[in-house]
Amino acid sequence: MSKIFFVTGVNGVGKTTIIPHLKSLLSETDFVVHDFDARGVPPDADRNWRISETRYWISEGKRISEEKSTVICGFIKPSDLDEYDLSNHESPEIVLILLDAKPEIIRQRLVNRYTKNGVFDEAQKVIGKPVNEFIDDNVWFVEKLKNEFEKSGFSIIETSDLVPDEVAEKVVEIILSKKG
């Protein structure tokens, strides 16, 4: 039976960046790859929005599960799946893969993303927060998310010293090892 794979991690870890690499490495006859945020992210995105989008992507994965496995790149946590009956054998298995990076790497990537010539636009907001707060929250959450994944037994890929195609190759190795 096909599976649903969520490739997740904090902002700045490289989830969106690896999508084209995954699409080139995974057979289109066996896999479909999506960006979790493809339907748009509201300015006040929160846990409720994330749970709603997770439901949507799980239903999409179920819809095509007879034909292909689904890979979704975007932020979810293992605890987001608590409300789903993962033991239901009529549904595809859900597998999470964490892309992890050192907090200082995440900070640098997000600073680079949200500055112009090294300067923040102080009025800039990301999901309803000032950009500095958004960056600090993501950096703080790196270890917390990694701990949640370690407790849940899902795969973790350390990406700090890898380029996007190397990260994608490691993701594909995990996907193919669990596809069976």
Image: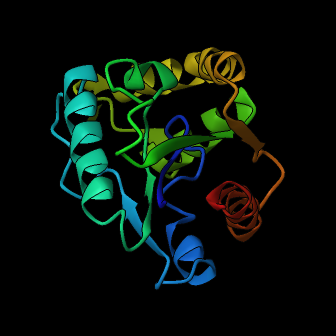
- Residue 123 makes an appearance in the image: no
Q: Residue at x 38, y 34 (%)?
A: 88
- Residue 83 makes an appearance in the image: yes
Image location of residue 146, percent across then percent down: 67, 23
Image location of residue 94, percent across then percent down: 48, 42
**Does residue 161 appear to the left or right of 58 in the view shown?**
right
Q: How many numbered circles does the render carry?
A: 0
Task: Name the residue at the front extreme.
Answer: 89
Image location of residue 38, percent across then percent down: 26, 59
Please identify the quarter of the rendering in which residue 172 is found. bottom right
Image location of residue 12, percent across then percent down: 55, 44
Q: Is residue 108 above or below residue 135?
A: below
Q: Residue at x 24, y 38 (%)?
A: 55
Q: Residue at x 59, y 75 (%)?
A: 21
The C terminus lies in which quarter of the figure?
Answer: bottom right
**Nearer to me, 52 or 66:** 66
**Nearer to me, 68 or 136:** 68
Q: Is residue 105 above or below residue 141?
A: below
Q: What colouring does the structure picture have?
A: rainbow
Q: Is residue 43 above or below residue 46?
A: below
Please identify the quarter of the rendering in which residue 104 is found. top right
Q: Residue at x 75, y 32 (%)?
A: 102
Q: Is residue 50 above or below residue 8?
A: above
**Does residue 48 appear to the left or right of 7 in the view shown?**
left
